[in-house]
Image (tube, rainbow, N blue to C red):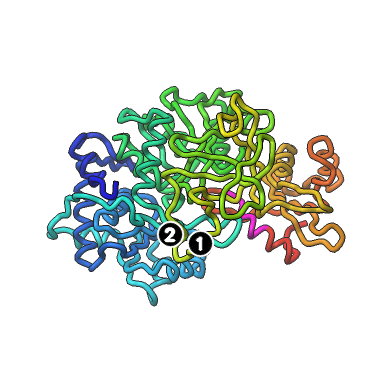
Amino acid sequence: MREVPDWLRWRAGVSPDAVALKFGAVELSYRDLQERASGLSAFLLSRGVGRGDRVALLASPSESTVALVHAIARVGAVSVPLNHRQSTPELLSQLRDSRPSLVIHDAALCERAKELQARWELVSDSAAESAAVGLEPVPGDRLDASSPHAIVYTSGSSGAPKGVELSLSNLMWNAVSVGFRLGASSEDKWLLCMPLFHVGGYTILFRSVMHGSGVVLHPRFDPKRVSLSLDNDGVTMASFVPTMLSAVLEARGGKPLNPKVRLILLGGGQPPASLVAAIKERQLPVLLTYGMTETCSLVALSNAWSSSDGPAYRAVFPSEVTVAKSGTKGRLVPADIGEEGEVAVRGPTLFGGYWRKPALTRARFRGDWFLTGDVGVLQPGSGPRGGPTGGIAILGRKEETIVTGGEKVFPAEVEAALREHPAVKDAVVVGVDDARWGQRVVAALEAKPEFLGSPPAAAELTAFLRDRVGRYKIPKQYHFWAALPRSATGKARRGDVRALLERGGGDS
């Protein structure tokens, strides 16, 4: 389908009084959200914003931000949610790349917005809502499902951020597949404490409209407030990354989870062993997700304890996930079971391309298969090659693989082992150029608070790892830092770590 009915208008007609959004003391029904979006759509048209124009959002999650996202889609424009935690040069780089007609900011980010004012037209969300009063509302009709709906920039945890074009069709199929697999309904309430500039948070806004469920929105991640929300707001589903879930469980102490919470989706990579143990001990309803911005959030799921070798991810219908033989060009050649290769994905949630980067887009596709950049292996299953398998184990990022003395090291394996040490809060392992070995394995570590003044010696860490990983995988150097550089979701920024180590940075 090239066109679809306006989602929000349809939902407001079907269940006008159902709660669409709870934000602190503010509670909006679907009728309320429809009216807010209609007014803001009129404002955008009055400012000359139309089909294909980009509108950047420099705003924290709020009811206004949610209404703006729907309003931008209604006039055929393209949302560009910006990470307000980035530096001004980083924001300017993304604005120069996306070339928005308008930048809308909230009151809390007024000072950040002023740093961009010389180059871009700015307006606050409150001014936009005030200006909409008296204008003829735009109720919504039909939306172009195939053209870009949003440009979401990748986190840049492994390299420079890239603008990923997501269509309304991508978001619709994400909602369909999640609803099909997880049984989402109008009885659900989804706790949303992820940033809206992160695809894992952004997609929840659209799933909720299709399913008729409510969203409990938080302006930022605060583990104590999130814990209270899980208890008191009727939440049935929530999305976290491992650092967030660990912080929430710590804030709860030993308090049991509210039985209304039927599902927790956990993305952002394999959780540390301590978190997996806590999930098992508390019998938490956790599913691990595999996905990325380019796949419009999740495309595969796994139980946190599905395999002793790590989680085995299975595709969420109708997407497909496989492993391609290394070095194949032009067309995808599936790997054999047990053979390492690059994880490939195809399906209707797959992005339209990298914004203004056609060559890069072409390089990442083999026919209709997208090469994710992850290294994986097909696990044994019940069927022959090409049929059902035991799922896909993710070994690590292809670009992060370290080759030392001719041997391959996947950082994720070593990092997971290091996190089991009682003094280590988090770890990032990278390869640094070495004249003898090609690359040497180096670890940047963040100590737990009680070990900040007296971190373990290198010899102790090496001895600890000998029983857990191969000898060639053990780091040659360890650097303890007060804090690892992190993205907005708490994920360590590997590129920044590597750059600091190459410059000789670090506390020890």
Identified by mark 2, the residue type is: Leu
Identified by mark 1, the residue type is: Gln
| Residue 449 visible in the current orientation | no
Seen at 32% across and 28% down, the residue is 187
| Residue 270 visible in the current orientation | yes
Label 2, residues with CA under 10 Å away: few <14, some 14-19, many ≥20: many
Label 1, residues with CA under 10 Å away: few <14, some 14-19, many ≥20: few
Q: Which mark is residue 492?
A: none
Between residues 204 and 329, which one lies in front from this camera angle?
A: 329
Disc 1 target residue: 86
Report x, y in % for residue 362: 51, 59
Element assignment for label 2: loop
Between residues 335 and 300, which one lies in front from this camera angle?
A: 335
Labels 1 and 2 touching (C-beta < 8 A) = yes
Is residue 495 within the magenta segment?
Answer: yes
Disc 2 target residue: 82
Q: Which label lies toward us, 1 or 2?
A: 2
Q: CA distance from mark 1 to mark 2?
A: 9 Å
Which residue range is magenta in the image?
A: 491-497
- Please indicate whether residue 37 sits to the left or right of residue 393 in the image: left
Between residues 313 and 42, which one lies in front from this camera angle?
A: 313
Report x, y in % for residue 305: 61, 28
Seen at 55% across and 23% down, the residue is 283
- Please indicate whether residue 134 sits to the left or right of residue 369 in the image: left
- Please indicate whether residue 307 sits to the left or right of residue 464 in the image: left
Seen at 33% across and 30% down, the residue is 185
Is residue 425 within the magenta segment?
Answer: no
Report x, y in % for residue 353: 45, 57
From what the image shows, is residue 447 above or below residue 48?
A: above
